[in-house]
Image (spheres, grey):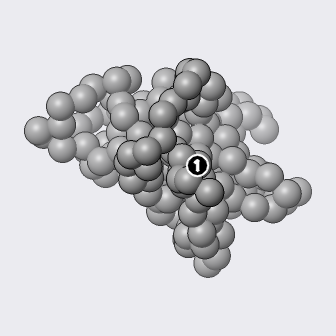
Amino acid sequence: MVFTGYRDQRGLSVSRLDLSAAPRVADTLVMEGRFETEGRSHAFNATMQQDGSGALGLPTATYTEDANRLPWESDDSDVTFLTFDAAGRFGFAGTLARGTEPDPSYTCEVSCVDWYGNARPIFIAGRVFALTGAQLAEGELRDGRIHELRRLDLTAQR
């Protein structure tokens, strides 16, 4: 079980709860200077290997004192990835950055962000994606870090 929250002003804390015996916090990682930007439960996604290790992703943004948005009123967000080992210890894997502004010639017709919010991590068939704003970025987890492979602007003229 994974949960998020804030203990202080340093940034977002992500903790893994071990339920194999008496419940205990297996590990907590503080993402300094970052805050969670999407409160809906389907914003978070994870993948797990048979040995209990894996990765998770969640929408985040960099906190700045002069930010003119509240976390729950966020615009497009980065997708931050963490890895975890079989014992539940986290590692910070990095982010796939939010997309640029949509193509200026693009006109949204119907509910263009409501169906997924401002960002989503996607793990499918061994691949890693970040849907953020109007872009889909593919990444690869290699040596405990996320590396961007390619990016598609979903609003660009074809």
Q: Vertically, is 40 above or below 133? A: above
Q: What residue type is labelled 1?
A: Leu
Furthest-bottom residue in view?
Answer: 143
Residue corresponding to mark 1? 154
Furthest-left residue in view?
Answer: 66
Q: Vertically, is 102 above or below 109? A: below
Residue 66 visible in this rendered orientation of the protein: yes
Q: In this view, does 49 lie to the left or right of 23?
A: right
Q: Residue at x 44, y 49 (%)?
A: 103
Q: Which residue is drawn at 23% across and 37% down?
A: 9
Q: Where is residue 38 in the image (x, y as percent from the top left)?
A: 47, 30
Q: Where is residue 129 in the image (x, y as percent from the top left)?
A: 65, 55
Q: Position of residue 45 (x, y in %)?
A: 67, 41
Q: Residue at x 56, y 72 (%)?
A: 147
Please name whichever residue, 75 or 134, is drawn nearer the observer in this view of the structure.
134
Residue 30 visible in this rendered orientation of the protein: no
Q: Is residue 51 left or right of residue 27?
A: right
Q: Residue at x 81, y 62 (%)?
A: 126
